[in-house]
Amino acid sequence: MAQTSKFSLAYTRTAKAKASHPNESIVRQKEAIYKYACENGYTIIKEIKHIKPSGYLKDFRLLFSMLSKNKKIKTILVYSHDRLTRHVCDCIFLERHLKAKYGVSVIQCKDMPINNDWTNENE
């Protein structure tokens, strides 16, 4: 049986270039994402780094464009869901939209059990 690679996109975001809290640091986020990817068989083929305040849905045009052009990406790895967006309703809507339109799941990489896709309605 051939092993299939799990192609993913690393998504990091911080409000300011110099983070006030260690977990907001782009470097810390990337370290956790790449560690998770390595330990769980993901291959990161693209990265998005946002340095701007709170992620609103209108800020995801680059992400949507990248996913439209690269059909191999099936997972977005984020340090934590609040790095994607601070608004719970937006986060749920965004993750369901990514799954429905692009077939992409979002996985939080900080200190979480391996199966942490909390939008999976099949479980």
Image: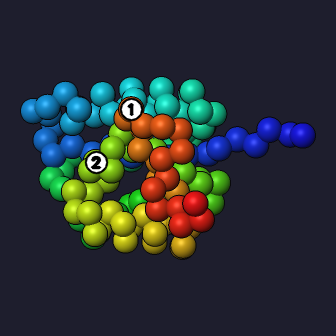
Residue 68 visible to an observer of this rendering: no
- The structure's colour scheme is rainbow
Residue nearer the viewer, 28 or 115: 115
Locate the N terminus by quadrant.
Answer: top right
Estimate the x, y position of residue 121 in percent, counting from the top left: 53, 67
- From this view, report whether residue 56 is shown above or below residue 106: below
Q: Residue at x 86, y 40 (%)?
A: 2
Locate the C terminus by quadrant.
Answer: bottom right
Neighbours of disc 1 within 10 Å: few (<14), some (14-19), many (20+): few
Which residue is label 1 attached to?
111
Q: Amino acid at mark 1?
A: Asp
Q: Amino acid at mark 2?
A: Arg
Q: Residue at x 64, y 54 (%)?
A: 72
Residue nearer the viewer, 79 or 67: 79
Estimate the x, y position of residue 41 in percent, counting from the top left: 63, 33
- From this view, report whether residue 73 is shown above or below residue 120: above
Q: Residue at x 46, y 69 (%)?
A: 96
Estimate the x, y position of residue 105 in percent, counting from the top left: 52, 57
Q: Alpha carbon of mark 1 to alpha carbon of mark 2: how far?
A: 15 Å
At numbered mark 2, what does the secondary structure look like: helix, strand or loop?
helix
Which residue is label 2 attached to?
83
Residue 15 visible to an observer of this rendering: yes
At numbered mark 1, what does the secondary structure look like: helix, strand or loop?
loop
